Amino acid sequence: MGFKYTILGGDKRSLELGKLLMKDGRDVCIYGFDMLEEYNNETVSLNEAIEYADVIVGPLPFSTDNLNVNAPFSNKAISIDMVLDFMSEKQMIIGGKFNIEHEKKLKNKNIKSADYFKREEMQVLNAIPTAEGAIQIAMEETPVTIHNSNVIVLGYGRIGRVLSKMLYGIGANVHVSARKYSDHAWIKNYGYISVHTKDLKTYLPKMNVVFNTIPQMILNKELLKSIDSNCLIIDLASKPGGVDFEAAREMEIKAISALGLPGKAAPITAAMVIKDTIYNIIEELDV
């Protein structure tokens, strides 16, 4: 795998990814971090950064506005259309959460692409720093210990499973809400308190912390009425999330949207997961 890589925008995960690739002996160009002191003298142009690499590595998410690459540490916008115009069929782009329009454009240009966020190994391992980051927020934002607190995890997907296990491990009274009967069987098997989604209104008043992992509106105004004003809500679901934040503000319930936790809580670990996933993709594609 003697490819040259360009890290294009992103948060601290992307920056650490570039450093990890360098440690592996890869040739790496890092672009889109000029707001950071160590990169504020970027001399290469976008065109040069793209032309340099065999593999362009985009951030997670690839874009937040569907027009520009997600580059919070860049003083200048990085147009997605411009990036694609500069690329050739000999190159490959790997990013997280491409939208349908981006995938169509890549296909039309006959450019190899892969979405590392769709990979199961990425999703599973990414759930670990997400869960740790969520627990860190809970510890910082509540006046009581997580140990012996009543907590509920809404949803029993990858993040829900990892988070429930961690909370149980530090002594919380863990409740888990799910719809599938198969999930309820596993929830009970691990010693958590199983809650059917339809019964949330009964359990929510007893909670100190609510963790939502369901990427659709679940904590609506009606359910929020049953939550104690001292309860903390941490929403881990992708935008638009699963909490009516406006209603929560009106009721003076503290609700936090906690997106991108791997990049904030453990950027090096998150970067290692992305790096390994990228290597897997390249190996499987045999490029």
Image: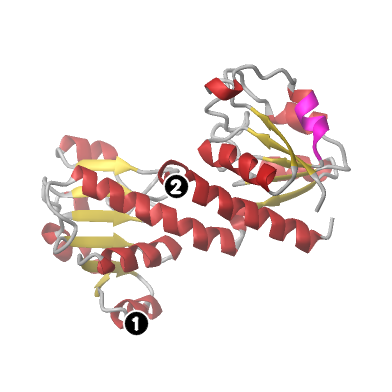
Q: How many marks?
A: 2
| Residue occupying image coordinates x 74% and y 24% | 46
Query: Where is residue 35 shown, x and y percent of the image?
Result: 54, 20
**Which-is-in-front pick, marks 2 and 1?**
2
Horizontal side, residue 219 vs residue 110: left or right: left
Judging from the image, what secondary structure is the residue with disc 1 in?
helix
Horizontal side, residue 99 vs residue 2: left or right: left
User: Between 179 and 8, which is closer to the camera in this rendering?
Assistant: 8
> In the rendered view, would you say 23 is above or below 118?
above
Query: Where is residue 224 shown, x and y percent of the image?
Result: 19, 49
| Residue occupying image coordinates x 27% and y 71% | 196
- Neighbours of disc 2 within 10 Å: few (<14), some (14-19), many (20+): some
* Residue 188 seen anywhere in this rendered image of the structure: yes
Q: Which residues are magenta?
A: 48-53
Amino acid marked by disc 1: Ala
Judging from the image, what secondary structure is the residue with disc 2 in?
loop
User: Between 243 and 192, which is closer to the camera in this rendering?
Assistant: 192
Q: Quadrant of residue 22?
A: top right
Q: Main secondary structure of the magenta part?
A: helix
Task: Give the alpha-carbon distance from disc 2 to disc 1, as whole Å.
Answer: 32 Å
Q: Which label belongs to residue 185?
A: 1
Magenta residue check for 52: yes
**Disc 2 target residue:** 266
> In the rendered view, would you say 224 is above or below 31?
below
Pointer 2 and pointer 1: residues touching (CB < 8 Å)?
no
Magenta residue check for 184: no
Amino acid marked by disc 2: Ala
Which quadrant is the C terminus positioned in?
A: bottom right
Query: Where is residue 280 shown, x and y percent of the image?
Result: 70, 60
User: Between 19 and 242, which is closer to the camera in this rendering?
Assistant: 19
Horizontal side, residue 157 vs residue 184: left or right: right
| Residue occupying image coordinates x 36% and y 49% | 133
